[in-house]
Image: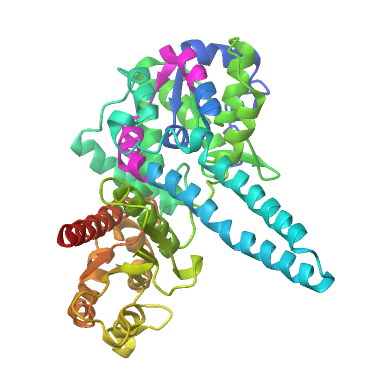
Amino acid sequence: MLTGEEPPGSPERGLIDGFEGYLSPSDEDFRSVLTSGLVVLDTNVLMNLYRYDPRTRADLFKVLERLAESLWIPHQVKDEYWRGRELTVINRRNSANEAISALEKPTRQAEEIIATWARSVGLPEERHAELRQLIASAFDDLRAAIRGPGGRDPLADARDTNRDLVFAALEPLLAGRVGMPLPPDDLTKVLAEADRRASEEIPPGYKDRDKADHRGAGDYLVWEQTLREAERRHVDVLFVTSDAKEDWWRKMRGRPCGPRLELVAELRKRAGTRLFMLQPQDLLGIVGRLLQVTVQPESEAEIARTAQGSVGEGDGSRDRIRLYLATALTEALAGDVLSGDIKVCLGGSAGGSPWDVLVEAHGAAQAGVWIYDPVKPFNDLATDSVRSTAMVMAQNLRGDHPGLRGPWMACLVDLTSLTRGLSQESDHWQRGRHVESRFPALAEATFAPCVDQVIAAGFSSVVMLPGVDHATETDLGSFSRIDQIVDLIREHFTNARTSEN
C-alpha cells in the first residue's frame, strides 16, 4: 500500500487526510506552536552557541528568551550537552589556532614570491621593504580578526563552568524545562527499539548507527523522549535542529523542506498533535517576524554557515593534538615561569622540525614533544622498529652527545589509526556500538609493551592517547592526558629555574 493510501472499506475522507506531512505551515501555525506548543531544542543548537560570534549568540539568546515558556529539552540533549561541552570549547580554541597557524605558510610564500620578483627586476631595497611590510600588515590584520576584539576570545576560559558565558545564559533559561531520564527498564527497551529501527532504516537515527556506545541511538532517544512529553502535554511540537540528515528531514533537491512523513505520522498517532521542524537560522527569522524580536540578518547567515561545519574541526588528529598542546603550553608557561627568552614553537607539518612542539629558551630547545603514530607511515608495530624510530627522533633533538642535561623529551602516542584498524576487523554493527569502550583499550594494550622501548631511547615521558578523531568522551580523556605533559614541562622549567638561582 502506498504512503497515505486508505485501506479498502475506509470511510470517505478529504484531500489532506493521511498526507498532513506535506502541508506547508502557515504563520498562524508557527505563532501557535511558538507560544503554546512545545519548542524542543536539539543538542547541536546548544553546542553551536559556543561557535558563534558574540552578536549572533546574543541574537539567538534573545529569540530563546522570547520562547522561554515553550522551551523544553529532552534528558538525552542534557546528557549530550554535558558530555560534549568541554570538547566543543577545546575545538573552538583549536580552530582559531589552526587558522592562525595555517596563515604562516601563505605568508612565507608571499614573501618569497615578492623577493624573487624583486631580485629579477632589480627593485630598490626601500621599495622591497615596503612590500614586505604590506604583506606582514595584511596577515597581522587577519590574525587579529581571528583572535577577535581585544585579541582575546570571550570563551577562551569556558572549560571552567564559572567562566562559561554560554552556560551562564543557558542555565536559568532551561531551569525547570528539562525532561527526566528514562527509567532503567524503559531505557533497555528503547535501546533495543533503536537497534531495530536502525536496522530497518526507520527514522530518526539510522544514519548514526555507527556511533559508539549510546550515541548511535541518541537521535531516537531524543525523539522518544519528545514523543512522551508531547503525549503528556497533548501539544504541537516544533523541533529545532541543525542536523540536516535525511533521517530527520523530507528533502527536495537535497534541501530540507519539512519533517519526514514517518515522524509526522508517529507524533499524530502517539499524541494526536502536529510536528513542525526548523533549522536555527529559520527560527531566528520566523520569531523575529511573528513575535517582534529584533535580530540581525547577518546572524541568520552565520548560523547557517556554522551548521555546515566549524573551521578546523575534522582535521587530522595529529594537527589537533599539536595545536592544543602548543596553546596549553603557551598558557601554562605564561605566568611566573615564562620569560621573554622562552617560547613555544610548532614543528611537524607546521614548521621545519620533525618534533611537533618545541619549547626554546635562550634560542635553544629545552623541551620537545613528539606525536607518534605507530601505525603510519612506518608501520613500526609490524616491523618491530618502535625503539629505532624513537632513537632517531631523540638523536635529532639531543645530538650525538646528549650529556646529563639534554632537552626534556616526551612522546604522545596517537592511537587513532591503530584503534580504527582494530575496529575494522570486527562486525560492522558491533564496531559502531562498542568502539569507544573496547577498541581504544585494546589499542593501548597492543602498544603498551613498546612504552619501555621509547623510554630506553631517551624519552622522559610516554603518554598514550586514545585518539582525538571524533568529539567523544575518549577525546576528552586524551586532552586530559595532554594536560599531564603540559604540567610535566612546566615542572621541568620550574626546576631548571630553581637550579639556576
Q: Quadrant of the C terminus?
A: bottom left
Residue 260, magenta (yes or no): no
Please provide percent x and percent y for residue 58: 50, 23
Q: Residue at x 66, y 65 (%)?
A: 109
325 or 273: nearer the viewer: 325
Please provide percent x and percent y for residue 242: 52, 37
Quarter of the image holding residue 14? top right
Q: Quadrant of the N terminus?
A: top right
Residue 217 visible, this angle = yes
Q: Residue at x 55, y 26 (%)?
A: 55
Quarter of the image holding residue 448? bottom left
Above or below, 231 relative to 357:
above
Q: Residue at x 22, y 56 (%)?
A: 484
What's the magenta region? Answer: 61-87
Quarter of the image holding residue 318? bottom left
Prevalent SS, magenta region:
helix
Residue 51 visible, this angle = no
Above or below, 433 relative to 365:
above
Labels in figure, total: 0
Q: Residue at x 54, y 52 (%)?
A: 99
Residue 86, magenta (yes or no): yes
